[in-house]
Image (spheres, helix red, strand yellow):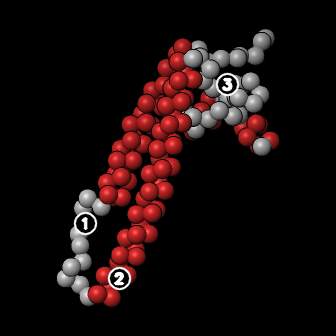
Amino acid sequence: MTEKTTYNEKELEEFRALILSKIKSAKEDLDILRAATANDSDNGTEDTSPTFKAFEEGSTTLSKEENIKLAERQAKFIRNLNNALIRIENKTYGICRQTGKLISKERLRLVPHATLSIEAKKSQ
């Protein structure tokens, strides 16, 4: 019996639905992070003591930096998911770029944008 080298249309559609769902959720999270970074809901500290305000401003700067990093990471995740959709269209989705073998369905369900099988990832 020959080893399977690609996923069939039904399987690809299952992965497409999963990826589209993850993209929708990731975009919602990214919007929240961007809003937090923009500080659209500033509560202000005009009526508090100057010492407390200095501490809060430092905390705000740190939070904004963390949110920017998280937003960049989320944007990269969305790009990777979009690239996975392109691979589905090209019928190359789920093929390990190192070994050329199929990546397991279990791995793709957990990491739908994966381009390496577990074996290839471990060898890195």
- For label 1, the crowd category at 10 Å Cα-Cα, with few meaning under 14, some 14 to 19 and many 20 or more, is few
- Secondary element at image label 3: loop
The three-letter amino acid code for the residue at tag 3 is Ile
Residue corresponding to mark 1? 42
**Dot 2 or dot 1, earlier in sequence:** 1
Residue 95, numbered label:
3
- List the residue tagged with mark 2: 54
**Vertical order, 48 against 58 (above or below):** below
Q: In this view, does 106 lie above or below 30?
A: above
Tell me residue 112's x, y (percent): 56, 34
Q: Which amino acid does label 2 sit on?
A: Ala
Residue 124 in the image, given as x and y percentages of width and height: 77, 43
Residue drawn 51% across the image and 26% down it = 85
Q: Can residue 106 be seen in this view?
A: no
Q: Please tell me which residue lies in front, 13 or 26.
A: 26
Q: Kindly give the residue lying farthest to the top in the view shown.
A: 1
